[in-house]
């Protein structure tokens, strides 16, 4: 993998990267249906991707919920002199958009880089070639456990993150603006479609991030420099995918409303 | 080069580039059954790149690869699984899996390629470890043993396939002289007693003059020399002369 120096080179590199990502995704899907299920590897990845990200997600989404309610409270108090409805304004936004997307971005950075670095290191030390020689396809042995773990754990982390944002926001609203927690927690404002939109986004990120990151790792060439490039490429591409998927799913749900 | 039924392996006009870097530009090479063929050249000459094409770890940009007269160039990854049963690869850094014991490393291809159960593969792995005198260290992990011993285990792992062809990528690089001689003796014994065809990527002149039947030197993406070790030693070509004598000055760009 070398840095393309011209616009044409960049386009070719992008096309090759997208082609490889589709190919890895296709192979991973095939092994999801036909391949063996290595449960110890899947649980190990679920622990690494999910459990070890919980604290990070709770802290980040908790502060996000606090900040949103703080800002909403300031504005509501200044304009209408009443901050009792800030929960009803903030929560749909957190459930539909900020919860899943920020969780996705955190997974893209923390987990995506880890996947790309680990697989990239295996590529440059020929361990992936050794797997292929031993009839152990990388898509089955390396990608599938990470994909299954992300498909389960990203929605789970999103749910945890939204919950953290909810309670942190409620605390800020109650302490900062005297909002009644019962009024804040008016779930009538969050409709079923909001929850579905949030979970569909989380599931989509759970599929896209490991495939993009694993592809970046599998494309690593050379030595440690190649692994570094793969890691950077993984975080950039996975973050971009989160934003694009967010837009596409939001657009689709907009037409369904 | 036309296909020849006496040749077990044929590379015909192989081209391979990585981005702008051209590594192979029309390599022709045919290897007979049972030969120990050394592929030599300076670092970056494309030796490993060439042999990886035989087992589908790399795909050529152009050219044809034949195995026993069958064109395998367009094989799918799944078709290569069967070929990798017959042609095995001993990697330069052994590439044993750190999370497994030496015995489990050897047992892995027995389970994956030959469909053995966990218990059967473990028992069979011990017999292959005995062939390389590593049975006493079966429960150790790769990190607990030295390079030479890891190389022996990698050879045992490759032997589990009962291969027709073994590809050795720099098998003696980084080994002490005694371990290197042991590895050479193992390669020679496999050729003599089991008729295994060996493709050996190496810089090691002692190995070349000790066990090679044939020497192929790659230079600037092409075959520069193809002959016996004596042809190699006595070549008048200034580049071969520089290489065989290890001269820092000469026409070969460093």
Image (spheres, rainbow, N blue to C red):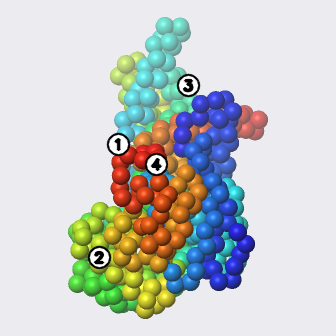
A232 sits to left or right of B139:
right
Q: If you read the primary sequence from the N terminus, does the residue marked by circle 1 or circle 3 appear first?
A: 1
Instruction: Identify the element where label 4 is drawn.
Output: loop
* As drawn, B200 above or below A236: below
- Would you name the residue on which mark 1 appears? A55
Circles 1 and 3: CB atoms closer than 8 Å: no
Dot in front, 1 or 2: 2
Quarter of image, res A62: top left
Q: Position of residue A108 (x, y in %)?
A: 49, 41
**Badge 3, how many Cα within 10 Å: few under 14, some, many 20+?**
some
Q: Residue at position x 35%, y 22% from top?
A: A175
Quadrant location of the N terminus of chain B in the rendered image: bottom right
Residue identifier under label 4: B252
**Real-space CA distance between mark 2 and mark 4, rounded to the nearest whole angstrom:** 29 Å
Q: Is residue B185 visible?
A: yes
State whether discs 2 and 4 lie on one chain. Answer: yes
Side of B236 relative to B29 (left or right): left
> What residue sits right under mark 3 in the picture?
A89
Residue at x-position 49% and y-position 44%: A230
Residue that numbered label 2 is attached to? B181
Q: Closer to the observer: label 1 or label 3?
A: 1
| Of residues A208 and B138, the one drawn nearer to the viewer in this rendering | B138
Say which element carries label 2: helix
Q: Which residue is found at the position 26% from the left and 73% from the top?
A: B179
Circles 1 and 3 on the same chain? yes
Marks 1 and 4 sit apart, C-alpha to C-alpha, by 58 Å
* Mark 1, secondary structure of its residue: helix
Image mark 1: chain: A
Instruction: Have a look at marks 3 and 2 and say if they share a chain.
Output: no
Comparing labels 1 and 4, the label whose residue is closer to the camera: 4
How packed mark 4 is, by other alpha carbons closer than 10 Å (few <14, some 14-19, many 20 or more), is some
């Amino acid at each position: 993998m070398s840095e393309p120096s011209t616009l044409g080179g960049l386009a070719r590199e992008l096309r090759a990267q997208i082609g490889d990502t589709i190919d890895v995704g296709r192979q991973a899907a095939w092994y999801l249906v036909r391949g063996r299920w290595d449960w110890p590897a899947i649980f190990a990845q679920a622990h690494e991707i999910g459990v070890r990200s919980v604290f990070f997600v709770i802290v980040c989404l908790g502060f996000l919920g606090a900040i949103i309610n703080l800002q909403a409270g300031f504005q509501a108090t200044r304009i209408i002199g009443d901050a009792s409805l800030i929960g009803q304004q903030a929560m749909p936004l957190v459930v539909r958009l900020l919860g899943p997307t920020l969780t996705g971005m955190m997974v893209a950075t923390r987990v995506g880089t880890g996947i790309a670095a680990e697989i990239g290191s295996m590529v440059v030390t020929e361990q992936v070639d050794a797997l292929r020689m031993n009839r152990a396809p990388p898509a089955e042995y390396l990608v599938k456990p990470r994909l299954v773990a992300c498909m389960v754990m990203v929605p789970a982390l999103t749910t945890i993150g939204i919950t953290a944002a909810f309670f942190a926001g409620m605390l800020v609203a109650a302490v900062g603006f005297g909002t009644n927690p019962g009024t804040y927690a008016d779930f009538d404002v969050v409709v079923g479609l909001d929850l579905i939109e949030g979970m569909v986004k989380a599931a989509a990120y759970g599929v896209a991030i490991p495939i993009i990151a694993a592809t970046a790792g599998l494309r690593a060439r050379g030595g440690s420099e190649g692994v570094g490039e793969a890691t950077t490429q993984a975080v950039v591409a996975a973050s971009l995918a989160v934003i694009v998927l967010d837009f596409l799913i939001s657009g689709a749900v907009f037409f369904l409303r | 080069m036309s296909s020849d039924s006496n040749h077990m392996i044929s590379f015909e006009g192989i081209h391979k580039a990585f981005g702008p870097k051209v590594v192979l530009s029309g390599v022709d090479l045919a290897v007979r059954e049972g030969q120990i063929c050394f592929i030599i050249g300076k670092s970056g000459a494309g030796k490993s790149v060439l042999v990886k094409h035989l087992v589908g770890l790399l795909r050529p940009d152009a050219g044809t690869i034949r195995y026993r007269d069958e064109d395998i160039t367009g094989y799918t990854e799944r078709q290569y699984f069967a070929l990798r049963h017959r042609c095995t690869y001993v990697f330069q850094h052994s590439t044993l899996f750190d999370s497994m014991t030496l015995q489990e490393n050897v047992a892995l291809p027995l389970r994956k390629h030959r469909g053995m159960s966990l218990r059967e593969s473990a028992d069979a792995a011990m017999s292959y470890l005995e062939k390389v005198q590593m049975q006493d260290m079966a429960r150790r992990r790769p990190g607990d043993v030295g390079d030479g011993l890891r190389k022996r285990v990698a050879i045992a792992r490759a032997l589990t396939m009962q291969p027709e062809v073994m590809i050795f990528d720099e098998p003696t690089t980084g080994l002490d002289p005694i371990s290197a001689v042991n590895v050479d003796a193992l390669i020679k014994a496999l050729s003599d007693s089991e008729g295994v065809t060996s493709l050996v990527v190496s810089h090691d002149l002692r190995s070349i003059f000790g066990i090679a039947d044939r020497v192929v030197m790659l230079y600037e993406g092409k075959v520069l020399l193809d002959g016996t070790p004596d042809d190699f030693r006595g070549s008048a070509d200034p580049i071969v002369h520089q290489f065989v004598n290890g001269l820092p000055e000469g026409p070969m760009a460093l």
